Amino acid sequence: MARAATTADAFNAVAEPRRRQILDVLAAGERPVNDLVRELELAQPQVSKHLRVLREVGAVDVRDEGRRRLYRLNGRALKPIHDWVKGYERTWLERFDELDVVLEELKQEEVEDGGKHQ
Amino acid sequence: MAANTSSGTATVSLPTDEQILITREFDAPRRLVFRAFTAPELIRRWWHAKRGEVTVCESDLRVGGKWRRVMIAEGGFEVGFHGEYREIVPDEKVVYTEVFEGAPPESAEAATVNTATFEEVDGRTTLTLLTEAPSKEIRDAIIDSGMEAGLQDALDLMEDVARSLR
């Protein structure tokens, strides 16, 4: 199932490594722009530009507190990405559950063989 | 025993645009996990992911050796994968290429490089499986294929539910 390739979707917003970095920092909690500038070691205009893209797709929310602008993650906007990966993840979950069964048998065999295969 | 297994704890993440990273802990020493992950007669028993029947499962486990797996998925379509072993450290690590047969472009350029590492702590083993695709497009196509499988799962479940209501 091909996903929509619009320029203003969450997929596009997180395609940029710096923006993923911003999301990682915000995952730990709400932050003012200055914190992000410091952590990313980028100039403020660049950080603001990335934040604008993230805001457009709703991946981050902003609020004013006195003279500070605080940014925080909005996980719901990233749900399409989560859903997209989910199907792939499910295949591997099933595989690993089957692998657990195989491993239990191998362990059992070793016990029965008295550790001959060590 | 089954209650001790770590069912459902696998995590999938996308560290970069070209990568997929899967990690999962197993309640077994790594020599067994390594064996189950590399021996064809054992791969045959888990790789199907309950989505079909494995019809071909061959591997020549040595550097430069080839491997191939084919599964007939429910619904009758065949999916095949093949590749080559690049690096083997017994019980610790295996690096291999993987090509999805039938997907354009079906060529060496479309191959992903997969690195499986096995780390053991207190008799439990963490498997880390890193898939590195040659481009974001190919990485995304791999995940898309999983999306379809996931959708199929959902439909199957729906069918079960529908049947139970009869």
Image (cartoon, coloured by chain):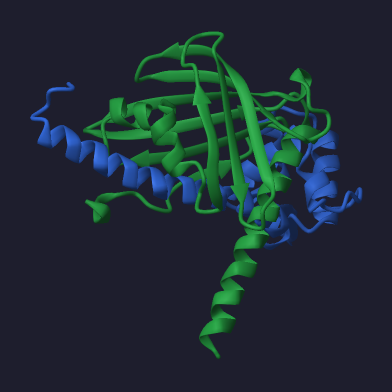
What number of labels is visible? 0
Rendering quarter of residue B139: top right
Question: Which residue is more in the foreground, B147 or B84?
Answer: B84
Q: Of residues B104 and B25, which is closer to you in this image?
A: B104
Q: Residue at x 18, y 22 (%)?
A: A117
Q: Is residue B111 visible?
A: yes
The image shows residue A86 at horizontal and vertical percentages of 61, 54
Rendering quarter of residue A65: bottom right
Chain seen in blue: A
Seen as rendered, the residue at the extreme right is: A7
Please give left or right for residue A28 compared with residue A57 in the image. left
From the image, state the color of chain B: green
Q: Is residue A35 visible?
A: no
Look at 26% across and 31% down and name the residue there: B29
Left or right of A107, for residue B55: right
Q: Which residue is at a point 83% across and 45% down the rendered structure image?
A: A12
x and y, in percent, of residue B3 in the image:
25, 56
Of A111 and A72, which appears nearest the observer?
A111
Provide residue B37's location: percent of width, then percent of height. 42, 31
Q: Farthest residue in the top direction?
A: B63
Q: Residue at x 77, y 33 (%)?
A: B138
Placement of the C terminus of chain B among the 4 image quadrants: bottom right
- Say left or right for A44 vs A37: right
Measured along the vertical axis of the image, is residue A63 above or below residue B87?
A: below
Give percent across and percent down for residue A61: 74, 59
